[in-house]
Structures are given as C-alpha cells and as structure tokens.
Image (cartoon, grey):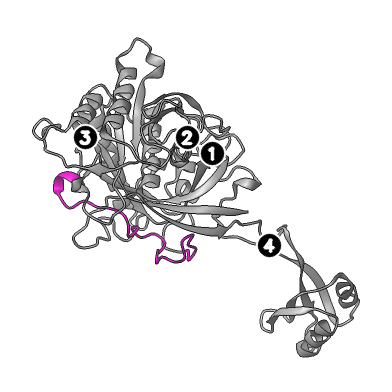
Amino acid sequence: MKRLVRLTVGGLWLVAVVAGSAGSASGAAATPGQYIVVLKPGVSRAAEVQQARALGGEVFMQYGHALNGYAARLPKMAVDQIERNPRVAFVTSDGEVSAAATCNPAAGQCLPAGIDRIDADRSSTRSGDGRGNVNVNVAVLDTGIDVSNRDLNVVGGKDCTAGKGFGDPDGHGTHVAGTIAAIDNGIGVVGVAPGARLWSVRVLNQNGFGAFSRILCGIDFVTSTRTNADPSDDILVANMSLKGPGFDDGDCGNTKKDAVHLAICASVATGVTYIAAAGNSGVDFQDGIPAAYDEVLTVTAVTDFDGRPGGLSSQNCLPDFDFRDDTIAFFSDFATLSADQAHTVAAPGLCVLSTVPGGYDLISGTSQAAPHVSGTVALCIASGSCAGLGPAQIVRKIIGDAATYNTANPNYGFVGDPLHPISGTYYGYLIRAGLY
C-alpha cells in the first residue's frame, strides 16, 4: 500500500509518497522469496554464503555477532537443499516489520500516532477500546465531509459554496473530521472524540479556497443551531482549519469593520467554542484570522512519529524535510503577543493519519493539529469536566489544564513549548485529551 502525504502550508501543497507497513517480525507477513539462514555455531559463514550463491541465491545481509548466518533471496529449490544441510540450524522466512506506533488501517482499526500522543486512549471514552461514543455536536467548517464514509457519524450540514451539497470533493475536511471523531467501530482509524455528531459545513471549494462571505455563511449556520427550537442539533464545538488575512482589533471587529470577527463573537456568545489552526507560514499569527481572534482557541503544530514523548523516533513521512520527533513543526505559525499566548495550545500536526474520501491518508499542517484540540474540547464537554462553562471559560480551562499537566510532567511536552522555549516564539503547551 502507498499513502499520499500532503503538507498544507497556506495554500502551498508539498507532496511526497511513503510506503505503507505490514506486521511485526513475529507472525509478520512473509516477504516472498526472502529467507534468513541461521548456521550452527562454529560453521564457516563464508563457505555457506558461497554455496547459497552457487545455488542461485542473492545474499544481501550477513551476521557474525548476535548469530551466525545470512539473509538471502533464494529460489525454492535452493531453500530445500539448504534446509537439509547439516551445518544449518534452521531457515525461516523473512518478514516485514514497522515502527511500534505505525497505524495501518488496512489491517483493522488502529490508533493514529497523534491520537496516541495526547493520550486519547486514556480519556473517559478510551479511544480504541471499541466502546467509546461522544454525544456532542461538532461542526467542521472546511471543504465538506464525505458523508458516505463508514468511519464518520455525519448527521447534517450546510453548503455555503457552489450549491452541490456538503460532501467533500477535496478531502481536507474529511481528514479533519476523522481526527476529531472517527468512530470506534473496529475499522480504519479512531478519533479523539469517537462518534461525535459531525456537521459538515462546506465553506471552501474543491481546491481548498473560499471567501469571507462563505465563511460568514458557515458561522451563521452554526449559530442558527443554537437559537432554533431543536436542542438536539445544538453545535457546541466548531473547527476552523483555515486562514485568511486580518487581525484582532480588540473590539470584535467593530473598529476595523471585520464581519467575520463580529460573527464569531456573536456565535461564541450563544455557546459555541471555536478552534482555529494557527497557520503554516512559520510567522506570528497575529496577522491571520481566525487564529488571531482572542475569542478562539488557536492551535500550533507539533511533530510526533511514534505516539510517545521523548523524541525517540527517527521515522519521518516527509524525508526531504528536517523534521525531528517531538519538536515544534518548523512551518507552524506562533504567538508573540501576550493576548495571543493566552489562547494558544499545541497538538500533533505532522504525518497525521485520518479519513479521506475513499480511504485514509497522511496529511500535515496546523489544519491537522486543530482537530486534535476540537476533539479534546468535545471530550471535556461530554465528560462533564466542562459542564456549565461558556466558551471563554472552556478555552481557559483547556489551556490551564494543559499547562498544569505539562508542568507536573515536563517530559510530556516538546522542544518549543513554554518549558523548553524557543526565543521569540510561543507555541503553547501540548494538549492532553487523557485529562477528560
């Protein structure tokens, strides 16, 4: 299997292809035609390697310390003859292995590294145990969501673009949705808040672009669910993995005539918590919206390859770029203003595996970090930890809880967080879904 790896960087798409993985060495899928030959102690490896080559074998690895033997590509006839050799201890099939945290949805449901990294499997719903279900309405303002995906609980939506429905012709929105809420159903992947009720609010076109007028349509729709007579459709969390030019005037947009800011403030007042991607230009996000708005929870992107703290993995789905495990992603925008630092957290945003139309893909960007936080907010609400809190209080709680946990567990975070800072930048503390 091959997976497409996409890095969304403010409209720039960097593309690479990586091979999928198989099982472990024990019970691993055999690699056809490849064998490991273990020789008895004291047997001349050079002579046995020469014999294997004389039988048409291609010896590509030799061992002389931990064991005596070699690995080779061998025709079946040669294998039979080598197995009968009294100097050979045994012959075994070679097999494929993968990093411990590698998630392969083709083999059944798995826990993506980012979900694992923020301990969603230790939350109140224990993502991945087959039983978790979060009864919270979450809106995804994006390119739409693939409504036919069996791994997603899409309950409704709004098309604010071309009038062709709220499905997803691009894949970006579906990817975001899967990280938030892929169902704990034994297939594919599982999200931070499994089974959450997803609302597909299509505000971007098939190329991932939109206009402020479309964004306003989406915010207006989300707000309408909070003011109608049906409490079952009340959207409590809204993910905005998108960015446009603008800044926070400190007056909900009234001073600089920013209609998007005005609308978000009004929507927040009805009880919707908005989560926004910081942006992917490696700059201060004070000049990008909605990230710059004080009323939203803004998310920066952290690298993680193995679902564990400590920078232990050298795996990298984008080998042409110098990403290090458990560090801030170099493309991530950041805060410098104290007002912006007050609404900033971090989440995994590199090589994130999630749903797309027709399957699963790896995509990178703060767009992929934000849904980790949206799912965490949904968990906080569903578990009762955020019961009775308004959006501003929820933002403060999520940030405060992350700060408290990271401070008590300094090895949980990453290079670039407030405990391991990079001068002139602020990326926030790493979120922990396991707190809820």
Q: Is residue 164 magenta?
A: no
Cα separation, mark 2 vs mark 4, equals: 38 Å
Q: Is residue 327 magenta?
A: yes
Task: Give me the residue at 50% from left, 38% from top.
Answer: 126
Cα separation, mark 3 vs mark 1, equals: 32 Å
Residue at numbered disc 2: 168
Tell us which disc is closer to us: 3 or 1.
1
Tell us which disc is closer to us: 4 or 3.
3
Cα separation, mark 3 vs mark 2, equals: 28 Å
Report helix, strand or loop for mark 3: loop
Q: Position of residue 30 (x, y in %)?
A: 74, 61
| Quarter where residue 375 is shown | top left
Q: Position of residue 319 (x, y in %)?
A: 47, 65
Residue at numbered disc 3: 295
Report helix, strand or loop for mark 4: loop
Tell us which disc is closer to us: 2 or 4.
2
Cα separation, mark 4 vs mark 3, equals: 50 Å
Q: Nearer the viewer, residue 39 or 11?
A: 11
First of labels 2, 1 by sequence position: 2
Tell us which disc is closer to us: 3 or 2.
2
In the figure, 386 relative to 207: above or below?
Answer: above
Q: Position of residue 261 (x, y in %)?
A: 20, 32
Residue at numbered disc 4: 25
First of labels 4, 1 by sequence position: 4
